[in-house]
Amino acid sequence: MSKVIRIERHGGPEVMQCVDVEVGPPQAGEVQVRNHAIGVNYIDVYYRTGLYPQSLPGGLGLEGAGVVTAVGEGVTQLKAGDRVAYCSGGLGAYAELRNVSAAGLVKLPRGIDFETGAAMMLKGLTVQYLFRRTYKLQKGQTILFHAAAGGVGLIAMQWAKALGVTVIGTVGSPQKAELARRFGCEHTILYKEENVAERVREITGGAMGRVVYDSVGKDTFQASIDSLQPFGLLVSFGNASGPVPPVPLTALKGSLYVTRPSLFAHTANRANLDEMATDLFRMVGSGKVHIEIDQRYKLEEAVQAHRDLEARKTTGSSVLLP
Ligand code: NDP
């Protein structure tokens, strides 16, 4: 038996229920993992509310770290007892025990504990592809990064600093501004109070940002466009405030570029996943990127974890502990 979080309908955090289920043996190509820690991500909210499609009833969660307890037919690279981490392979990570596709699993290096593994895979691989694959940032460039004190945000602040990139980060409170600065953010903007594009103009002496990373969506889209230099790139990679409404192409005046990337398009290719994970483990192993876990909840407290995340009460990563 395994404790799992299930939803039977879409809605607020209260639709999540903690139930006991029988977990069958792993199917061909699958691995059974006993999760020691589970990552909480904003994308889990999108699946719970129905913004992203999912069949019901179903599980939630994409990210975890734990120990392999059994392998299905055809799985040769992993065996019972291996320490692993994952951030794909189907919904259902909010569970003590689960079957997950082996295609998305990587072995967790000895020096990385389970909580850190669960807190860093989805968010860290996201920063990896945003900074090294979507656009290869170069030393000396200036970027604008929204929600700088969040889970993805704090990893991004440190990674950018390690690359010699100057970050202007937006945050929802002075406390978050201080935290983002501690993690390498050079300039902070309180986007509830200040005009973002005006502040970017001031900070950059009129040069504006080379790339804007926007995971807030609806509320920040226009400010993001207005903060770019000619030929600049807007990376719209999330919708914490709601999806961006359709925009006319004429909004991209100044020869701007926009992309709407997804982590899973990158990790669907095993060679890419391995390369990205190696880079992430190197950054964390070298101490250049510290994975900050500011919230820990029991698995049964998933409802509270989502309430806190949506109320903008969290900073850094959150994990559920089975
Ligand atoms: P965060 O820890 O960053 O939490 C979201 C943050 O967004 C909040 O803390 C808050 O920070 C800010 N925010 C701004 N407006 C709102 C709002 N109206 N409601 C709630 N939050 C708001 O989450 P994650 O680190 O898990 O993810 C960050 C973003 O990156 C998400 O949008 C996620 O979907 C996206 N993402 C996209 C991926 C992709 O490949 N496309 C992969 C991984 C993540 P503040 O108070 O400072 O404003």
Image (cartoon, helix red, strand yellow):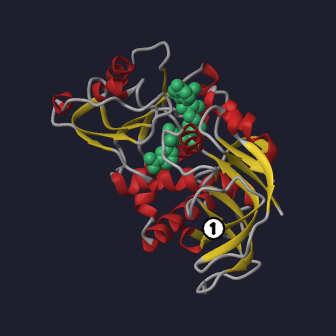
Q: Residue furthest top?
A: 193
Residue 309, how many percent across, how many down?
Answer: 64, 33
Can the viewer see residue 84 in this picture? yes
Q: Quadrant of residue 317?
A: top right
Quick check: 44 left or right of 230?
Answer: right
Residue 283, how many percent across, how many down?
Answer: 56, 59
* Quadrant assignment for the N terminus: bottom right
Q: Quadrant of residue 195?
A: top left
**Residue at screen point 63% across, 62% down:** 285
Q: Is residue 224 above or below residue 284?
A: above
| Number of numbered discs overlaid on the protein picture | 1
Q: Quadrant of residue 297?
A: top right
Q: Is residue 34 above or below residue 204?
A: below
The residue under label 1 is: 100
**Residue at screen point 37% across, 31% down:** 244
**In the image, what residue type sits under mark 1?**
Val
* Quadrant assignment for the C terminus: bottom right
Residue 308, how many percent across, how many down?
Answer: 69, 30
**Element assignment for label 1:** strand
**Residue at screen point 50% across, 16% down:** 192
Q: Which one is nearer the viewer's eye here, 130 or 63?
A: 63
Few, some or many residues within 10 Å of mark 1 (<14, 14–19, 20+): many
Quick check: 68 left or right of 240?
Answer: right
Q: Is residue 220 above or below residue 101?
A: above
Q: Which one is nearer the viewer's eye here, 23 or 193?
A: 23
